[in-house]
Amino acid sequence: MTPDQALDRAFELAELGPKHGPNPRVGCVITDRRGNLVAEGHHCGAGTPHAEVAALAEASRRGVNVAGGTAYVTMEPCNHHGRTGPCSKALAEAGLGRVVYALSDPNPAATGGGPCLRRRGIEIESDVDPGRAIALNRAWVHAITTGRPYVTLKLAASLDGRVAAADGSSQWITGAASRRHAHQRRAEVDAIMVGTGTFLADRPKLTARQPDGSLYEHQPLRVVMGERGLGATEYLHVRTHEPAQALRQLAAREVRHLLIEGGPTVATAFLRAGLVNQIDCYLAPALLGAGGLAAFGQLGIESVDQASRWRTRRLERIGDDVFIEVGR
């Protein structure tokens, strides 16, 4: 196995981890002195063994001695005691001769594993593919480096940019395939938010449901933002109109990725505040006309030169609809 193949496999393993939660997705591959793959592992979520420890455990179960081998990891081994012990210590005690990682850990509480291993005489190759590692954990890296959740704004709109008809009806602008896709995306985030207006008008469940109606194992935190009273509810009520303040409250709950699902008032507030990182748009081949409800309110844009520009990351057809993912 070549070093590139080993790192590719580590990224494949990392992708098996959950996209939600307070921790990044990480994969690890261990090869022996000859470059043969002898163990691998990935992080399965908060409270479970980190990828390096999982790989070492597999090696132990197989009776493989990894001394002098190489560990390929998608992120720098941690160097702190959290829910689990430091991976740098575990790798050093296992006698690894070399550790290669794609990205230095941006978490100030956990970084330092590389230098720690180097001090113990282990050869280190750091930041060998940082772009790929950041893309794998885009929301987590953003949350750790900025101190606020990564924000995705979701829209289901007609061709003329309407999210509801003149009478206020919005179910269903897009088709069943798009709705299934949107529920899958819900199961990958930490929290879903709507405004009080949308909540009081529609009473959305904000759950992540599978095609048969059952719930996904992971259910995001359900959040309603605004100052109007909601009555008795099990949703988290963030009593503010200020997006930055709402994000601070959610960050305190270890929310790394927030999905905003409506309505236009909340969406517009986050866009005007410059706090939207990604837009997921489900575009239906339908027209609702000038009487329909626009996706956004006033953004303070007076000319094309002032347009809010985004970069297309993903474009695909879902049933009769088109899904577009854009980001900064």
Image (cartoon, rainbow, N blue to C red):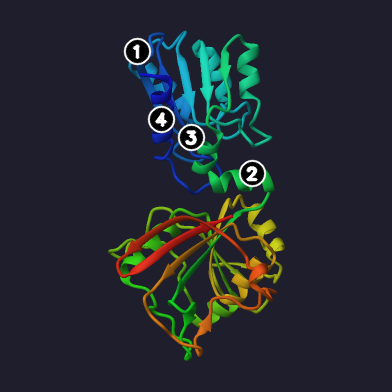
Foreground pick, 236 / 192 = 192
Residue type marked 2: Ile
Alpha carbons under labels 4 and 1: distance apart: 25 Å
4 vs 3, front mark: 4
Disc 1 and disc 3 in contact, CB within 8 angstroms: no
4 vs 1, front mark: 4
Outermost residue on the front side: it is 305
Foreground pick, 72 / 221 = 72
- Sequence-wise, the earlier of marks 1 and 2 is 1
What residue sits 46% from the left and 66% below the top? Answer: 281
Residue holding disc 3: 26
Residue type marked 4: Asp
Q: Is residue 101 above or below residue 251?
A: above
- Which mark is on residue 8? 4
Residue holding disc 1: 63
Foreground pick, 280 / 151 = 280
Where does residue 151 sit, x and y in percent of width and height? 58, 58
Outermost residue on the left side: it is 212
Q: Is residue 20 above or below residue 285?
A: above
Residue type marked 3: Val
- Callout 2 crowding tier (Cα within 10 Å): few <14, some 14–19, many ≥20: many
Alpha carbons under labels 4 and 3: distance apart: 12 Å
